[in-house]
């Protein structure tokens, strides 16, 4: 991997040298380095060997110097591996983003940050690996992920609204506010009067936009005569466990709660567990709505009323927005429409009037 | 990202130039590039800016030229993202390997290959990114992952025995044969007489070593007088669905089957579904044993008798073996002990005699 040196200077092998040694044209070497299309297995093998023997790429990252592109995008998720695997949204995003990139013959590498040290290591990787850009998710302010990536001079698009940094960080987000308003109107229409809200962490869209828009819409309905109000708001951490724990406490403190809005589906599942543990039923005694339409929302018991994020569309827009930024420095913010999915968790068999 | 050029030659910025511009010592720049320990936030910011302005790293990957190390290891999983997320073993390996690397201040990037095109893109990434080495899992022969990585001159350690390539590819594996023998003896002791085996894909250890050693051990027991034999062996693809489908067919063709050995726990879960769908019970009518002790093996219904792979130990050995290969070119093969975990799926309440 260490290149030849002469007189203290590094001598850079050229693409022609690689081609000569491999016995193929420079065009074939170029195609090989750009993904290997239309290169025979024999040529690929010969080029691989020539690249290794000359130290061509490790030495000069010559492909990047020529094209300015490595063809690789980093997906940096600022979560511990355990949290990453727990949340089905990441699975959906990784699958869809991978496919959207593959359609452009680009590859994705996945980095899990999750703490300050791993965020630092991610920054070093981004500095040294020559990736073309980064998609970020779950950035936690104290890890300084945005700053690190921008300091590294790497194009960056965030999944979701970057709380308070919307003017500086490109992002692709579901329409959090509209989704929360749709859920508020639905719960009020279903007869909810005393509503509890479990928001996400304070730095996340689910910790700000969703609870704010939800509460605003309930207040608006109340102003128009609906007998509904938000009685309590707490912040969870998007896990089932946090939804369960918060809902238990809220039900103990406010026994009259007849509806919950949780800022993601995992917390909504925890709420349902807590409601049942308290001897109440969903949706008979308490309505529960979530956000995301994550995997399992429609199949677990009961099917969950939620706000659908279109992860395929979000992933495609992410890849498009990142491509534009890589190509021309254009910063794009994209808001993707959402859809209210009404299911059993907010629709008692006898209808809202029977509650 | 594109460096300054003069007279057609690339002028390489030096570490001293970065240090001068950032107003810090070269030692501080070096510490920054090696992960940022003992560098103040202010200095980090100044160095980031200086690196960007000089094009220091993107230009010369100077850190690698100095140290010969990027501090990054690629974990290349030759599975589609959907399969990657379905199998809890990958989660365990990624978490454990990430921790073992972090303990050495190394970072991990994850690449999902899964088809020929993405394997090619992974090879290009490995060629251009300067990662120090690769851990591979689930390599499928038709994607030529080992050949691609070795052609790129990258140190490589595989998770599991690389079928037929044990002499050429370094690996860390659970003791597949011993695990299969332990399971065979246990099922025979529990009174199994007509045993069906669902092996893994033909290229995998579970497709070769586990079924062969299992069948050998049952034959040996039969030679010593046990009234047991393997009546049928089929290959699944490690998914729950394949276990279920194969078991249904096997039960239809061989109604007398009283025990199954599946080469992983996911397929064993599918077998249990098929047994129940046929009107039989586990373990009352049919014993079922798996392999892996994956997440959920002890909590799903019924708790599953299985062969425990110690993923933490395997991950640690992977990182050690890869480190040795990176440092000194040493190729190490490590076989990690396994343990039989006896649970309800092979132990009828009344004991083996009651069946």
Image (cartoon, coloured by chain):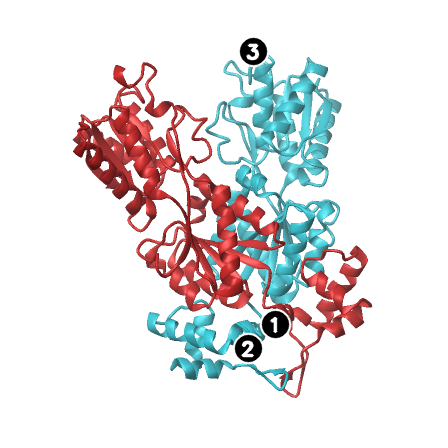
Chain colours: A cyan, B red
Give the Cα distance between marks 2 and 1: 8 Å
Q: Are labels 1 and 3 assigned to the same chain?
A: no
User: Residue B63 location, x and y as percent?
Assistant: 64, 68
Q: Residues within 10 Å of mark 3 (few under 14, many from 20)?
A: few
Task: State the image quarter where residue B120 is shown.
Answer: bottom left
Which residue matches tag 1? B65
Of labels 2 and 3, the one closer to you: 2
Q: Chain of mark 2?
A: A
Quadrant where the N terminus of chain B lies? bottom right
Position of B100 with respect to B279 (left or right) is right
**Residue positioned 75% across, 71% down in the render:** B18
Subunit under mark 1: B
Q: Please, what secondary structure does the residue beneath circle 3 have?
A: helix
Query: Which residue position is annotated with label 3?
Result: A354
Q: Is residue B14 left or right of residue B243?
A: right
Q: Nearer the viewer, residue B27 or A96?
A: B27
**Mark closer to the chain start, 2 or 3:** 2
* Residue drawn at x 43%, y 30% as measured from the top left: B297
**Pointers 2 and 1 in contact (CB under 8 A)?**
yes
Q: Secondary structure at mark 2?
A: loop
Residue A107 visible in the snapshot? no
Image quadrant where residue B343 sits: top left
Nearer to me, A189 or B291: B291
Residue A80 coordinates in the image, percent (x, y):
61, 43
In this view of the protein, which residue sits in the foreground, B87 or A304? B87
Please give the residue where the numbered disc 2 appears in the rendered image.
A3
In what element is the residue under mark 1? helix
Marks 1 and 3, Cα distance to the nearest angstrom?
Answer: 74 Å
Let me know if residue B156 appears in the view: yes
């Amino acid at each position: 991997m260490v290149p030849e040196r002469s007189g203290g200077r590094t001598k850079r092998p050229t693409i022609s040298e690689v081609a000569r040694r491999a016995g193929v044209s420079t065009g074939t070497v170029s195609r090989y380095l750009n993904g290997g299309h239309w290169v025979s297995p024999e040529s690929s093998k010969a080029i691989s060997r020539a690249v290794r023997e000359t130290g061509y790429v490790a030495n000069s990252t010559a492909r990047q110097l020529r094209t300015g592109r490595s063809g690789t995008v980093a997906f940096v998720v600022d979560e511990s591996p355990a949290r990453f695997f727990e949340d089905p949204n990441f699975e959906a995003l990784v699958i869809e983003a991978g496919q959207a990139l593959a359609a452009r013959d680009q590859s994705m590498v996945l980095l899990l940050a999750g703490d300050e040290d791993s965020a630092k290591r991610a920054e070093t990787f981004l500095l040294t690996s020559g990736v073309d850009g980064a998609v970020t998710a779950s950035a936690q302010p104290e890890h300084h992920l945005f700053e690190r990536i921008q300091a590294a001079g790497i194009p960056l698009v965030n999944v979701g609204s970057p709380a308070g940094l919307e003017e500086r960080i490109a992002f692709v987000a579901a329409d959090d506010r509209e989704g929360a308003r749709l859920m508020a109107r639905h719960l009020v229409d279903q007869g909810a009067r005393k509503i509890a809200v479990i928001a996400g962490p304070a730095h996340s869209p689910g910790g700000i936009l969703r609870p704010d828009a939800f509460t605003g819409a309930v207040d608006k309905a109340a102003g128009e005569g609906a007998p509904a109000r938000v009685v309590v708001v707490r912040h969870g951490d998007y896990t089932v466990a946090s939804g369960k724990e918060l809902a238990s406490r809220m039900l103990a403190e406010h026994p009259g709660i007849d509806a919950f809005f949780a800022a993601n589906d995992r917390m909504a599942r925890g709420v349902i567990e807590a409601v049942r543990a308290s001897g109440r039923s969903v949706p008979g005694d308490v309505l529960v709505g979530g956000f995301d339409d994550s995997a399992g929302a429609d199949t677990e018991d009961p099917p969950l009323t939620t706000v659908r994020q279109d992860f395929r569309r979000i992933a495609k827009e992410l890849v498009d927005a990142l491509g534009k930024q890589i190509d021309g420095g254009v910063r794009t913010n994209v808001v993707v429409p959402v859809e209210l999915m009404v299911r059993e968790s907010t629709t008692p068999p006898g209808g809202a009037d029977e509650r």
